[in-house]
Image: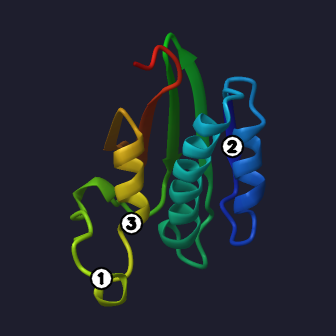
Amino acid sequence: MKFNFKPIKGKGLEIIEAIMNCKETPEDTSLRFKIRLCSEEIVQNIINYAYGEDEEDWMEVCIDRKGDFLFLGFRDEGRAFNPLLKSDPDLSVPDSEREIGNLGIYLCKEICDDITYANTDGCNCLNLKIRISGQA
């Protein structure tokens, strides 16, 4: 399934709901929580940081289910940015002393079985792979 959206501030919930209501998204509550958390992080980052005020913005979301895995792909033409290059937060530091940010991407890396990023033909392409069945 493929969706195209205008990632406009205030429209994140609409995008997340489309992902969560897609027939490929499993019904299992704990899996849905993981998928929603990762999707919200990626979608909000694109909405908040990918585009400037005057740019014509768009975002493509692809959802595919193959075997034991769900694949989520996020693509946009915003500023090139690889979130996987950001260092993980130091969780040994108390919350009040920790630098703000990076926790969402860190959680995505912990939840997903694989995350890849590429900038192809001027597009940011972030792909998530989440095990949805066959769990040990």
Please name which of the two marks, 1 or 2, marks the residue nearer to the observer.
1
Task: Residue at 42%, 37% (x, y): give it.
Answer: 127
Q: Can residue 82 be seen in this view?
A: no
- Residue on which disc 1 sits: 94
- In space, the residues marked 1 and 2 are separated at their CA atoms by 40 Å
Q: Position of residue 34 (x, y in %)?
A: 55, 44
Which quarter of the figure is the C terminus placed in?
A: top left
- Measuring from the top left, give residue 26's x and y in whole percent: 67, 26
Q: What residue type is labelled 1?
A: Pro
Residue ID for mark 3: 103
Is residue 91 depicted above or below 25 in this figure?
below
Secondary structure beneath dot 2 equals strand
Q: Which of marks 2 and 3 is nearer the N terminus?
A: 2
Residue highlighted by disc 2: 4
For the point 49% across and 54% down, the residue is: 77
Dot placed on the residue nearer the N-terminal end, 1 or 3 = 1
- Within 10 Å of disc 3 (Cα), the crowding (few <14, some 14-19, many 20+) is some
Q: Identify the image quadrant of the N terminus.
A: top right
The residue drawn where x is 21% and y is 64% is: 87
67 sits left or right of 53 in the view = left
Give the residue furthest to the top: 67
Q: Distance between the residues labelled 2 and 3?
A: 27 Å
First in residue order: circle 1 vs circle 2? 2
- Which SS class for mark 3? helix
